[in-house]
């Protein structure tokens, strides 16, 4: 029996999960769970949102200590987090302030400022990335010039934590592909993008960037003082650069048995798309705001960011702030009893991006589109789930049409798997069978890549996925209901 530890950090919580490999399956155990979330601070330029990365670091190291205490030797550690955000380091390797959160509105207007120098269509032909104001390249445009002038290094969040664990700096490519500075064909930095930044800042940014590595690269031994992690033979436990972008790790854990699958990595965001051998960089992909992020083993994740359960989670937060007693599983079952497709909204509307009172924003969208306004939490929840299912069906259809692929099954992984209503609605809206599970997809994808990197698993993605299948019990949902009704409802969104 051999055990690995996955550090999986999301926008609202972080976990350290151990996976014990025996008989071709992984047994998962949660060693630590801790809260995460952007911290708001006022500044003369407005409200700013930062990550408390030092607290995260402390929770990660304590979690790893607990993990090794609970399960014994660890053969490897891997870290994945949300994408795009970074820390800047000074010449002594010290962190220059808390990383900004991708939900900080400092990037308002940043894409437009960048496009004045490198137009959006030219940029897409270089980086294949959907335009999101929070892409790292636009965050750099919004960065304070004095801070950037002092910077000697830039590390994305998982690489920053990895640097603190090992003293080694790398940039893992799946996450680097969300920066907007990488070419998805060559999996290398794209000079034209870096030059555009350099012209803006009056300095070359490439010396800030650490060596690019593919998932599976062994970064080095974990040598944090006092942590004392060791393998079964007493060697220091290595850190493996897994698919450090959480979505890349989640896609590794799609338990697909046939090649014609689409996936939804369903959590705070819903990442909806296809796994392809090559990027798709044409004008129709750009117009559909589809993105080409990099996957494990040379793959491309051709997908769309759908706003996801964020809209629902923020609604729950709003109701609780109003002292309403909300139990999520009960709310989901009450939503299942509400008549469907009464009101649907465009969940990807920018109005739903910032934190805040989602029910009011939904009511406003309903008013604008001449639909009944939901009133009870169950009606709002049903509206959100119907609307998400419509967004998923659209994204899958567009990604399939534009890449010329057939889709025969939709896999859902991540926390959304536990929402049986959403899984069924996704089957109904897409007209395709939905295979839901594992809910711990990201941790499993992280663990199997570590296990292979240290020689305890072998093969390509199909072999890694066979381990995932053996380690989980996905559930299938078959499409039901009237497909034409979904078409009509989607038409109401425009
Ligand atoms: C999901 C995710 C997504 C990114 C977003 C910033 O956690 O990594 O893939 O686009 O966070």
Image (cartoon, helix red, strand yellow):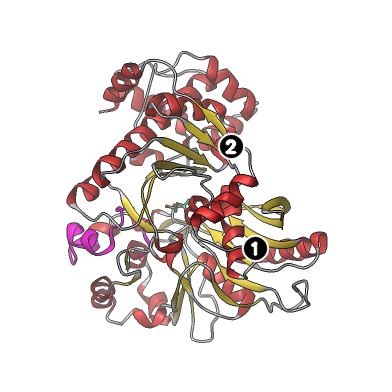
Name the residue at 41% across, 79% down: 208
Where is residue 8, by image quadrant? bottom right
Residue 339 is situated, as x and y percent measured from the top left of the image, at 46, 13
Q: Compared with residue 362, is residue 210 higher up or lower down, i.e. above or below?
A: below
Q: Which residue is mark 2?
A: 474
Residue 287 is situated, as x and y percent measured from the top left of the image, at 21, 46
Q: Which residue is mark 1?
A: 55
Q: Nearer the viewer, mark 1 or mark 2?
A: 2
Q: In this picture, which residue range is highlighted in magenta?
A: 113-136
Residue 484 is situated, as x and y percent measured from the top left of the image, at 31, 17
Q: Quadrant of the N terminus?
A: bottom right
Marks 1/2: CA–CA distance: 35 Å
The reply to whether the magenta stretch includes residue 44 is: no
Q: Answer with left or right where residue 241 lies relative to residue 201.
A: right
Q: Quadrant of the C terminus?
A: top left
User: Which of the two labelled residues, at mark 1 and mark 2, occupies the earlier sequence position?
Assistant: 1
Q: Which mark is residue 276?
A: none
Mark 1 crowdedness (10 Å alpha carbons): few <14, some 14-19, many ≥20: few
Q: Compared with residue 229, is residue 429 higher up or lower down, i.e. above or below?
A: above
Q: Answer with left or right where residue 390 lies relative to residue 216.
A: left
User: Closest to the observer: 312 or 393?
Assistant: 393
Q: Is mark 1 within 8 Å of ligand 1?
A: no
Q: Answer with left or right where residue 125 lies relative to residue 469.
A: left
Identify the secondary structure beneath mark 2: loop
The reply to whether the magenta stretch includes residue 131 is: yes
Q: Are marks 1 and 2 in contact (CB under 8 Å)?
A: no
Name the residue at 67% across, 76% down: 222
């Amino acid at each position: 029996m051999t055990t690995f530890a996955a550090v999986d950090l999301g926008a609202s919580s972080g976990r350290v999960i151990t996976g014990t490999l025996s008989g071709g399956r992984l047994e998962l155990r949660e060693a630590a769970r801790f809260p995460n979330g952007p911290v708001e601070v006022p500044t003369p330029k407005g409200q700013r949102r930062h990550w408390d990365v030092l607290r995260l670091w402390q929770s990660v190291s304590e979690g790893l200590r607990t993990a090794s205490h609970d399960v014994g030797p660890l053969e490897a550690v891997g870290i994945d987090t949300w994408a795009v955000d970074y820390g800047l380091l000074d010449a002594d390797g010290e962190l220059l302030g808390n990383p900004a959160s991708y939900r900080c509105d400092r990037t308002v207007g940043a894409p437009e400022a960048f496009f004045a120098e490198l137009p959006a269509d030219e940029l897409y032909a270089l980086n294949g990335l959907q335009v999101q104001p929070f892409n790292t390249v636009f965050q750099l445009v919004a960065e304070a010039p004095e801070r950037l002038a002092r910077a000697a290094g830039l590390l994305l969040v998982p690489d920053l934590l990895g640097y603190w664990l090992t003293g080694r700096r790398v940039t893992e490519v799946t996450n680097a592909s969300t920066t907007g500075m990488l070419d998805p064909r060559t999996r290398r930095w794209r000079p034209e993008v870096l030059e555009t930044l350099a012209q803006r800042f009056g300095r070359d940014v490439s010396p800030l960037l650490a060596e690019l590595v593919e998932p599976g690269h062994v970064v080095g031994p974990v040598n944090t003082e006092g942590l004392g992690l060791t393998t079964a033979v007493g060697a220091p436990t290595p850190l493996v650069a897994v698919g450090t972008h959480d979505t890349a790790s989640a896609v590794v854990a799609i338990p697909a048995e046939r090649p014609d699958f689409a996936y939804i990595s369903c959590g705070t965001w819903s990442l909806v798309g296809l796994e392809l051998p090559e990027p798709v960089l044409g004008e129709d992909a750009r117009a559909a705001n589809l993105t080409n992020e990099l996957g494990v083993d040379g793959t491309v994740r051709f997908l769309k960011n759908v706003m996801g359960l964020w809209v629902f989670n923020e609604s729950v937060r709003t109701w609780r702030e109003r002292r309403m007693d909300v139990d999520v599983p009960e709310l989901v079952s009450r939503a299942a009893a509400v008549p469907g497709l009464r009101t649907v909204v465009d969940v990807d509307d920018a109005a739903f991006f910032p934190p805040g009172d989602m029910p009011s924003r939904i009511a406003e969208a309903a008013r604008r589109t001449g639909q009944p306004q939901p009133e009870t939490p169950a009606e709002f929840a049903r509206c959100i789930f119907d609307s998400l299912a419509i967004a998923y069906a659209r994204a899958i259809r567009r990604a399939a049409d534009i890449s010329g692929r057939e889709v025969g099954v939709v896999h859902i992984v991540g926390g959304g798997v536990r929402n049986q209503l959403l899984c069924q609605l996704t089957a109904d809206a897409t007209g395709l069978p939905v295979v839901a599970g594992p809910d711990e997809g990201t941790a499993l994808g992280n663990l199997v890549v570590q296990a292979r990197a240290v020689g305890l698993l072998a093969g390509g993605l199909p072999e890694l996925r066979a381990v995932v299948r053996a380690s989980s019990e996905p559930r299938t949902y078959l499409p039901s209901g009237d497909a034409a009704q979904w078409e009509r409802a989607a038409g109401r969104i425009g």
